[in-house]
Amino acid sequence: MKITAYISAALCFCTLHPVYASQASPLPSWISGDSNCTIDGRPARMHWAIQDDPQTECDGDSCSTTSGVRTVGRFSDNGGPWVELARISMSNNTMNIRYLGAEPNNWQLTYNSSTQVANGWTTWRGQRYPLSCWKGDTPLPTRCQNYANEAIRHYETAKNLSCGFDPDARWHNNYNNHYGWCMQVGGQPNTLEAEDLARSTAISICRRSRIIPIDRATLPILPRVPMQ
């Protein structure tokens, strides 16, 4: 009798009743996916994503499955191993983060839409350290600093060559104007490269127009250096 009762219990199947939960709000684009960062001056990487997270609860022989999602993050400090992160809360452009490494602690990032960089802090053993993250290889302000410096270098080169380019939005040595324009267009690489190419091409044409053919007959005759 005991064996029969055991087999009957083993053959009991649970009935699953799916329950669909509302989906969590997606991550904002400034934090979703891969980001390059610096943590206390060191290079780092951060990744965030939304993953399916179904939950099943049973009451006797009846089970319910709830569909849901959860936010998962990870962080690599200076090429080190990936460590899990958890989102604590999101308010406007500020994200509160829980670092789940060997010594868990709280972090925070606040996104600045004008610079397209998220700045904040990490915590380690009671001390806060600066944290900055951005999309792409280089932060927008740094890209625009480089662009402005290169634009001025092109202008000075053209001036020294007496190319005669009329001052306009492309040809001038006002750093703030070049930097401000770059920030205004969001530092788009294709746009900046097109401007750099236009200036460098114009300078190349100017250089070629100034080349004076050399008459080899007018060159001085130099004595041959004897071989050692």
Image (cartoon, helix red, strand yellow):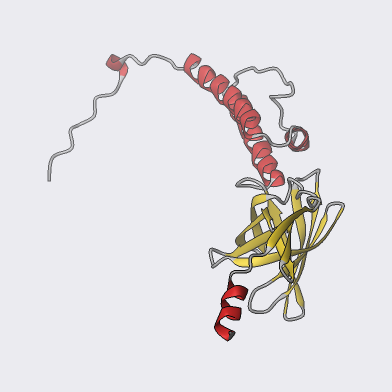
Q: Determine whether, in the image, residue 136 is placed left or right of residue 173.
A: left
The image shows residue 216 at horizontal and vertical percentages of: 29, 17
The image shows residue 189 at horizontal and vertical percentages of: 62, 34
| Numbered label tally | 0
Seen from the viewer's position, the closer of residues 175 and 63 is 63
Q: Residue at x 71, y 27 (%)?
A: 172
Instruction: Quarter of the image for the N terminus: give it.
Output: bottom right
* Residue 68 visible in rendering: no
The image shows residue 61 at horizontal and vertical percentages of: 71, 68
Specify the quadrant of the image occupied by residue 164: top right
Seen from the viewer's position, the closer of residues 153 and 129 is 129
Q: Residue furthest front?
A: 1
Q: Determine whether, in the image, residue 137 is placed left or right of residue 182.
A: left
Q: Residue at x 65, y 50 (%)?
A: 33
The image shows residue 154 at horizontal and vertical percentages of: 61, 30
Specify the quadrant of the image occupied by residue 100: bottom right
* Residue 154 visible in rendering: yes
Examine the rendered structure and indicate whether residue 188 appears above or below residue 46: above
Seen from the viewer's position, the closer of residues 29 and 142 is 29
